[in-house]
Amino acid sequence: MIDLNDLRVFAYVASLASFSSAADALQIHKSSVSRSVTRLETMLDAPLLQRTTRKVSLTPRGRELKERCVDILSRIHETIGYVGPVNQRPTGVPARRARFDA
């Protein structure tokens, strides 16, 4: 199963054309960015990026994935905004706990 965080990291790398810039934007280590992209490439059994010492560019499959994952991540963000923050605590009176004594 694809990790959504790996998709998010890939979207940053693809948009910024840089592992270092993506790491800075996400406030994570560059090695974590590299591992996320590698996991995605392994899972999809396809190279997504062409890397040189100075440049990162998208392969055809990488371009396709970028378009789709940006849409997917946007929809997830929109949905979470609609239903409320993930870390929001429920409000109201707590329900009584059921007893399962025999």
Image: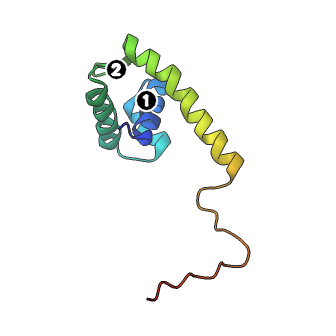
Give the SS element for disc 2.
Answer: strand
Task: Find the distance from the CA under tag 2 to the CA under tag 1.
Answer: 9 Å
Residue 49 got which mark?
2
Frontmost residue, 16 versus 81: 81
Residue drawn where x is 48% and y is 22% of the image? 66
Residue drawn where x is 31% and y is 25% of the image? 44
The amino acid pointed to by label 2 is Leu
Position of 29 relative to 96 (above/below): above
Check the image and name the residue furthest to the top: 60
Pick the quarter of the image with the N terminus: top left
Tell me the quarter of the picture where residue 71 sits.
Answer: top right
Frontmost residue, 2 versus 34: 2
In the rendered structure, the answer to whether residue 79 lies left or right of residue 98 reads: right
Residue drawn where x is 55% and y is 31% of the image? 72
Say if mark 2 contacts mark 1, CB within 8 Å: yes
- Mark 2: give few (<14), some (14-19) or many (20+) Cα within 10 Å: many
Position of 44 relative to 82 (above/below): above
Residue 13 got which mark?
1
Pick the quarter of the image with the C terminus: bottom left
Residue 40 got which mark?
none
- Measured as percent of width and height from the top left, residue 38 is found at 28, 32
Position of 82 relative to 46 (above/below): below
Check the image and name the residue furthest to the bottom: 102
Frontmost residue, 65 versus 95: 95
- Measured as percent of width and height from the top left, residue 78 is found at 66, 40
Tell me the quarter of the picture where residue 87 sits.
Answer: bottom right
The amino acid pointed to by label 1 is Val
Tell me the quarter of the picture where residue 62 sits.
Answer: top left
